[in-house]
Every structure is written in structure tokens, then in C-alpha cells.
Image (cartoon, rainbow, N blue to C red):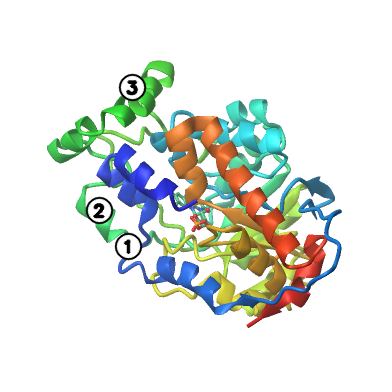
Amino acid sequence: MEDLDPLAQSYLPQALWEFGSVGVEDNLSRNANRDAFNDIWLQPRVLNNVSNRTIRHSLFNKNYSAPFGIAPMGASAMFGFEADLNFARAAKKENIPFVVSGSALVPIEKITAVNPEVWFQAYVDADRCSIGILTDRIWNAGIRNLVITVDVPVPGNRAATLRKGFEYPIRPNFNMAVDALTHPSWLIKTFFRTLLSSGLPHIENYGPTRGIPIISLGASQRKHVRDGLNWEDIQWLRERWKGRLMIKGVLSAEDAKIGNSIGLDGIFVSNHGGRQLDTAVAPLKVLASIAAEKGNMAVLFDGGIRRGTDIIKALAVGADFIFVGRPFLYGAALYEEAGVTHVINLLSEEIDRNVALLGCSNLNELASRIIS
Ligand SMILES: Cc1cc2nc3c(=O)[nH]c(=O)nc-3n(C[C@H](O)[C@H](O)[C@H](O)COP(=O)(O)O)c2cc1C
């Protein structure tokens, strides 16, 4: 899947490529997410007749075709034309979950019209009135699986992109114009097409109505500070939200314990793809200790997944389901729905092949095949 990286890098304006691909500060956490997989080795068994194997996997009483889904990624539709709709379409056809980002540039109602089973990831602050208004809208759009991202009390330090003036909203400048003009495929296939079909992209799903445009000369810069949010707010939401409730960005067993005690349905063990606290531990390193405290919750995992074996390892260590970010973003940017489907197929084939090579018939047998 990493073959998509150089292709996406040449297709996208440099500022956008950096916004998607880099982490924060020195990229230590982003790189550690990948490196952590190299510390785990697999031990195959032989002569097991694996001819009836399956990679289907169940989560929340639903049987998916594969054990992974598409992670929430904000501003995806700046990378690929209507990327969120293409994630939703491909996820529906291939029967995997897709979590719509709270910073998506496509209205949630348009996405649920394409795929009524998408999940929604919200960014909320401690203002319960706004949480109520947003979650009412989300519920009315048909969403039943809600994920609250909790690892961004203040924005991470995206030094590389800030240097290019890439803030929210983006203030266009001369260098950005040159950057865009020197990437004409993106300019025509993604940007102009978006302008023609729906005008300037807006952050659509922060509140009851659309937010400000993501490109603006005049609008004041929003800092997205959510530093007042606490467990009582999540508990309050737990009592109010009748669907499944998860939090995303958990890296400690103590937090998992609290999550279970207030009745959450799931937690995402994640460091946001290395995009918030640089030097935050790689999620794979703490996955086992968190899974031990999961109680009734599902343990969902993301960060650095680029191979079928990565998914196999995370499942074997204790995750119940896996999510993947950047490769889907690049697939959608380059080849729209076909690119998303391609990534799903590549990962599924790799999992199927490697499950067979491990001498397993299903994903529940993987735990006995790791050496760490
Ligand atoms: C461009 C981009 C935008 C993202 N936007 C969000 C977001 O809006 N909400 C969120 O919870 N996580 C967001 N993430 C983090 C992903 O959900 C996920 O945690 C991360 O990408 C997983 O790492 P991977 O890209 O190595 O698979 C974003 C990631 C990227 C690359």
C-alpha cells in the first residue's frame, strides 16, 4: 500500500501532502506507530488444512467482510473529489465500517443517503448545549455509532504545515497559488470539480448547520480548543445518547477502566496517527495492557497499519477491530471510489494469504501465533 505514497505526493499540492502525511513536531510518534509492528513476530503452524478459512469478522453484532474499517479523516474532500462519499460507497459495497470525520467537508445527511450505516466521529467541547444540538442532528441523520475524539484538548503542533500557512481557515497566499498551479491534475480533478459541484468547501458537521469555509481571506482563525471536556461530560452523553458510544484516542489502561465503568461501548486505542502529542506512545505498545481492562467494551485500534500482517498482529495482541487512515485517503485522492476499493482489496488479500500461511482458519486463532 505504501506504493500509493509517492503517487499521492506528486498528485497533491505540497502543503496538502504534508498536512496528510506528516504528524506533529519531529514525527516521532507517527514513525513509532510503524516501527512498533517490527517488534512482533509470527509463528506459523503447518499441515492444518486451511482450505475453509475466512477473514470475516464480527463487531457489535454485525458480520463484516474483513476485520478493518476506514478511520475518520477531516478535510478528505480537499484531497479527492467528494472523498467522504467515495469512502461511504466503497465501505457499503465491500461491507466494512467507515467513520465519518467531524471535520468532513460533506454534510452528514448526504453521506448517510449513500450509506446509512456509516459511523460518525464528533469533536466536542465541554458545552453540553452544543453537544446536545450536534448529537440530535447526527441521530436524525440516522447515525447510531458515535465516536468522540478525546485526544485533542488543544491542537497538536503541526509545524511543517503551519510554516506553509496551512491553518483553519486556510488564508490563500502566493506560495499556495503556485503550489496549486504546479499540481494541475489535483487542481482540475479535485479542486475545480468541487467548486463547480458544491462551491467552496465548508466544515459541515460541527453543529446544527454548516460551519465557515475552509478557505477564507477574512474569517478569523479558529483554534479548536476543547480543554474543558471531562469524564462527566462523556458520562452525561452516555446517558443521553441511545446508540453506541465510543471514545477515540485512549492510550492508558486506567482510562479504559473508567470508560468501561461509565458504560462506553468501545474505545479506539490510537495516538491520532501521530498527529497530536509527539512522543505519545505507539498504540501497539499499550494495546495488550488496555485490552486486559476492556470489560464489556470493544477495543478498536488504529495507527500505522500498512500491511495485512499489521492487522493480524494488532488482532493477535488484543484488538477487536482495526481502522486504517492515510492509505484510504491517498486511494480516494488518486482514484476516487476505485482507489478506496483497491486499498480494501489489497488489505483483504494480504490478510487472507497470511492467515493461510500462519496455518489458521479464522481470525480468532491468531492470538496463539505471536511471539513478542
Ligand atoms: C488527514 C487526516 C485527517 C484526520 N482527521 C481526523 C479527524 O477529523 N478526527 C479524528 O478523530 N481523527 C482524524 N485523523 C486520525 C485518523 O482517524 C487515525 O487515527 C489515523 O490516521 C490512523 O493512522 P494511519 O493514518 O497511520 O492509519 C486524521 C488523520 C489524517 C491523516
**Can you tell which mark lies on residue 192?**
3
x and y, in percent, of residue 74 in the image: 46, 44
Q: Is residue 158 left or right of residue 119?
A: left
For image coordinates 26% across by 28% down, the residue present is: 184
Asked if one can make out residue 301 in the rendered structure from this viewpoint, the answer is no
Nearer to us: label 3 or label 2: 3
For image coordinates 39% across by 35% down, the residue present is: 78
Asked if one can make out residue 37 in the rendered structure from this viewpoint, the answer is yes
Label 3 is placed on what type of residue?
Phe
User: Which residue appears farthest toward the left when viewing the image?
Assistant: 174
Residue at numbered disc 2? 162
x and y, in percent, of residue 59 in the image: 78, 54
Position above or below: 333 against 151: above
> Foreground: 276 or 123?
276
| Labels 1 & 2 near each other (Cβ < 8 A) | yes
Position above or below: 242 against 185: below
Nearer to us: label 1 or label 3: 3
x and y, in percent, of residue 88 in the image: 61, 34
Counting residues from the N terminus, which is met first, the one under dot 1 or under dot 2?
Answer: 1
Label 1 is placed on what type of residue?
Asn
Q: Is residue 113 left or right of residue 336?
A: right
Residue at numbered disc 1? 157
User: Which residue appears farthest toward the front when viewing the image?
Assistant: 47
Q: Using the numbered discs, state the Cα–Cα distance from disc 1 to disc 2 in whole angstroms.
A: 8 Å
